Image (cartoon, rainbow, N blue to C red):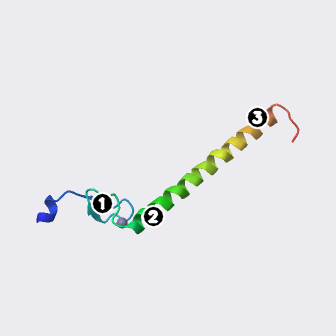
Amino acid sequence: MVERLVQHKHCRQCGRVTPAKDIFCSEDCESDHKRMLRKKKNQLLLLYVSSIVVLILILLLSWGVPL
Ligand SMILES: [Zn+2]
């Protein structure tokens, strides 16, 4: 029952109980999480860039610029 009183968090990657000062339960989870974040960031960037490209194409077409 002492465990319930000890402050703890759950690992942000796998959800296991971790000490309150740690965000992740292990270095593996930390690196996994970072990898995931980087992937997400890249996907977001790709989405961003492609939407800008589409926007520019639409603008060019509306101006009557031959492509
Ligand atoms: Zn974990």
Mark 1 vs 2, N-terminal side: 1
User: In the image, what residue type sits under mark 2?
Assistant: Ser
User: In the image, what residue type sits under mark 1?
Assistant: His
Residue drawn where x is 45% and y is 64% of the image: 31
- Quadrant assignment for ligand 1: bottom left
Label number found at residue 31: 2
Is residue 64 toward the left or the right of residue 16 in the image?
A: right
Q: Nearer the viewer, residue 2 or 64?
A: 2
Q: Which residue is mark 1?
A: 10
Is residue 12 toward the left or the right of residue 4 in the image?
A: right
Q: Which element type, helix, strand or loop, lies under badge 1?
A: strand
Give the crowd class for mark 3: few <14, some 14-19, many >=20 residues within 10 Å.
few
Q: Pinpoint residue 4: horizontal percent, then vertical percent.
A: 15, 61
Q: Residue furthest top?
A: 63
In space, the residues marked 2 and 3 are separated at their CA atoms by 42 Å
Q: Pinpoint residue 13: horizontal percent, then vertical percent.
A: 39, 62
Q: Which element type, helix, strand or loop, lies under badge 2?
A: helix
Label number found at residue 65: none
The residue mark sitting in front, 3 or 1, is 1
Q: Pinpoint residue 66: horizontal percent, then vertical percent.
A: 88, 38
Whether the residue under disc 2 has CB within 8 Å of ligand 1? no
In space, the residues marked 1 and 2 are separated at their CA atoms by 16 Å
Mark 2 vs 3, N-terminal side: 2
Give the crowd class for mark 1: few <14, some 14-19, many >=20 residues within 10 Å.
some
Q: Nearer the viewer, residue 16 or 66?
A: 16
Q: Quadrant of the C terminus?
A: top right
Residue drawn where x is 37% and y is 59% of the image: 12
Is residue 15 toward the left or the right of residue 4 in the image?
A: right
Q: Which residue is mark 3?
A: 59
User: In the image, what residue type sits under mark 3?
Assistant: Leu
Q: Quadrant of the N terminus?
A: bottom left
